[in-house]
Amino acid sequence: MITVAGSSYPPVGFYFSVTVGIFISDTTFQEVSGLNVVLGTEDIKEGGENQFIYRLPTPPKYSNLILKRGMVTGSALIDWARLAVENFTFMPQTVIIQLLSSNADLPLAAWNVANAYPLSLKVSDFKAQDSNIVIETLELAFTTLQRLL
């Protein structure tokens, strides 16, 4: 591990923050996944050319953003998700994800997730034989993912 100007490299993945649009105080999560983008290709055959096929890039495809946390009662964020999945009422939000330094004070990297809207809302299983925390999982679709830092 290398220390540069008070930060550790490579950075650890457990200091991060998530902000979901207007839900400023309701966005503490224990896990974030889905910060992925993949470019596809389209094969183009040219008439008379048998030696190769042109492979042209197609627009990016994004994975769904997955946010997990311990279940919170009276959550405005979950009410927003429920409006989408139960009433088919969508109000897209911008999600900002920041990876923080080991002191949890400086952002090392940040991502802007534009026009995010809920696709699913899951609650973990209830099991009498386990003493696990109930986990709620929010899955979001979005239009673009941009790295800010």
Image: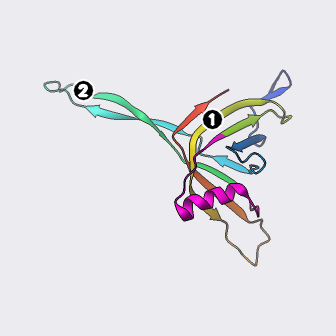
Q: Position of residue 133 (x, y in %)?
A: 77, 65
Amino acid type at circle 1 is Asn
Nearest the eye: 109 or 143: 143
Q: Which residue is mark 2?
A: 52
Labels in figure, total: 2
Could you tell whether 7 is left or right of 116 in the image?
right
Could you tell whether 8 is left or right of 125 in the image?
right
Query: Magenta stretch: residue 143 in it?
Result: no
Q: Position of residue 145 (x, y in %)?
A: 56, 36
Q: Which quarter shows the C terminus?
A: top right
Residue visible at 13% across and 24% down in the picture: 48
Point out which mark residue 129 bears.
none
Mark 1 or 2, nearer chain start: 2
Above or below, 29 relative to 122: above
Residue visible at 74% across and 49% down in the picture: 27
Question: Element type at marker 1?
Answer: strand
Could you say which quadrant of the image residue 79 lies in? bottom right
Above or below, 4 relative to 75: above
Q: Which residue is mark 1?
A: 112
Could you tell whether 33 is left or right of 72 in the image?
left
Q: What distance separates the C-alpha of mark 1 from that of mark 2?
A: 39 Å
Residue interval drawn in magenta: 69-95
Is any part of residue 69 visible from this angle? Answer: no
Residue visible at 77% across and 73% down in the picture: 130
Q: Position of residue 61 (x, y in %)?
A: 46, 40
Question: Element type at marker 2?
Answer: loop
Q: Which quarter shows the N terminus?
A: top right
Residue visible at 72% across and 48% down in the picture: 23
Q: Position of residue 142 (x, y in %)?
A: 54, 44
Could you tell whether 126 is left or right of 36 in the image?
right
Could you say which quadrant of the image residue 22 lies in? top right
Q: Nearer the viewer, mark 1 or mark 2?
A: 1
